[in-house]
Image: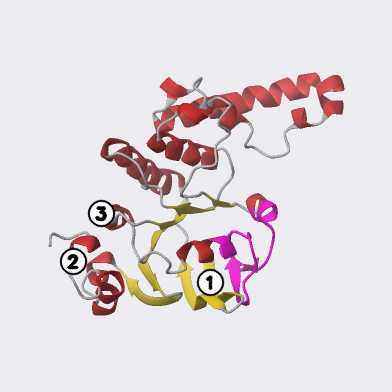
Amino acid sequence: MIRIENVSKSFGGLQAVKDVSFEVAQGSITGLIGPNGAGKSTLFNIVAGLFPPTSGRIVLDGQDITGLPTHELFHRGLVRTFQIPHEFSQMTVRENLMVVPPEQSGENLFNSWLRWGRVREEDTKVLERVDEVLDFLEISHVADELAGNLSGGQKKLLDLGRTMMTDAKMVLLDEPGAGVNRTLLGKIREAIRRLNTERGYTFCLIEHDMDLISQLCDPVHVMANGELIASGPMSEIRQNAEVREAYLGGGVSGHMGEDA
């Protein structure tokens, strides 16, 4: 679905991403891991259109999307979330979901005045979809809560919900487990798994929780110092000497999701 071809990115004299190539297959949950500063988020930002690569290209469903702006990629079904959720804090959870679908008739003042029947019909369909998303993610009990009052884990679920309000084909998840308690992390894990298996969402996710990566992802790609250093199933990644060195300087393996 996504093909990253020889992508590099430099900021002045700093090369943040160096000739990285890999694919995210349709229907997969692909992991992208590496120590802090490895270039993972920079690569995500390139794929998501936040800035162009210095060299290389990005292909989505056979079409070159290199350098296309985020809003155009959104309409092509490519959605990105962030490590720190970007909710509308003074709007309710329900309202946060309602504003996501693009090109709603009610956004046009002319339609609001003269085509109110059409606007009302669309709003009814959006609300039905919102209720379905709330139920799927098991957050109906906070539907009318201000989004800014949610816990970190609930905000991550809301991020997934906003993704569900689009016609997303490919979702880039940036640390969905960061700052989340274990109970809600389990809900997030199962929501991602169900969106993948039941609804056909393709995911690529950055994550530092190796247990979450192990439970969800195959394959896993590893970056260090801007370069791709390993790819494969997590069982192989854990045993890779170069990966261990990148994370730990050759030390204990606990950070790789194993007992030390």
Is the C-beta separation of discs 3 and 2 under 8 Å?
no
Viewer-side residue, 233 vs 26: 233
Residue that appears at 59% across and 24% down: 127
Foreground mark, 3 or 2? 2
Q: Amino acid at mark 1?
A: Ile
Magenta range: 45-73
Which quarter of the picture shows residue 258?
Answer: bottom left
Find disc 3 in the rendering and name its residue: 211
Judge from the rendering whether residue 242 lies leftward or rightward of residue 40; answer left or right: left
Which quarter of the picture shows residue 104?
Answer: top right
Viewer-side residue, 151 vs 13: 13
Residue 222 is tagged as none
Which quarter of the picture shows residue 124?
Answer: top right
Q: Amino acid at mark 3?
A: Asp
Q: Residues within 10 Å of mark 3 (few under 14, many from 20)?
A: some
> How far separated are the C-alphas under marks 3 and 1?
26 Å
Residue that appears at 31% across and 74% down: 246
Find disc 2 in the rendering and name its residue: 253
Q: Residues within 10 Å of mark 1 (few under 14, many from 20)?
A: many
Residue that appears at 36% across and 44% down: 179
Q: Residues within 10 Å of mark 2 (few under 14, many from 20)?
A: some
